[in-house]
Amino acid sequence: MKVTVDKDRCEAHGQCVMAAEGVFALGDDDDVVTVLDETPGEDRRADVEHAAALCPVAAIKAGD
Ligand code: SF4
């Protein structure tokens, strides 16, 4: 699957990092999330979809 984050929308809330650690990362001084893995495997699909659902600004797009 393919994961993208709209960095103009991201407000660094970090819910995505908790839902899908290893796919998303956020350092203490970051004001926008980093996508560590833009093409995670099927085993991460549920985590990434959960992250997208949790993001309060709907910045995460997860598709095939
Ligand atoms: S949950 Fe959304 S706003 Fe928060 S860090 Fe992730 S992409 Fe950014």
Image (cartoon, rainbow, N blue to C red):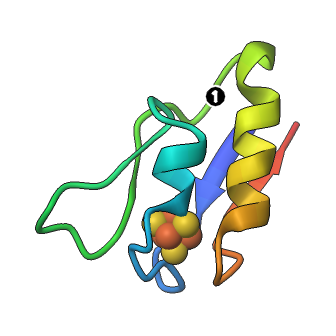
Q: What is the three-letter code of the residue carrying label 1?
A: Thr
Residue 17 image offset from top left, x and y in percent: 47, 48
Which residue is labeled 1 in the image? 39
Position of residue 58 relative to residue 52, above or below, is: below
Residue 62 image offset from top left, x and y in percent: 78, 49
Identified at 80% across, 30% down, the residue is 45
- Which residue of the protein is positioned furthest toward the right in this rendering? 64
Residue 1 visible in the displayed image? no
Q: Is residue 25 left or right of residue 17?
A: left
Nearest to the observer: residue 38 or residue 12: 12
Residue 24 image offset from top left, x and y in percent: 46, 44
Image quarter where the N terminus lies is: top right
Identified at 64% across, 24% down, the residue is 40
Identified at 53% across, 61% down, the residue is 15
Position of residue 46 relative to residue 18, above or below, is: above
Circle 1 residues within 10 Å: few <14, some 14–19, many ≥20: some
Which secondary structure, mark 1? loop
Residue 57 visible in the displayed image? yes
Nearest to the observer: residue 5 or residue 26: 26
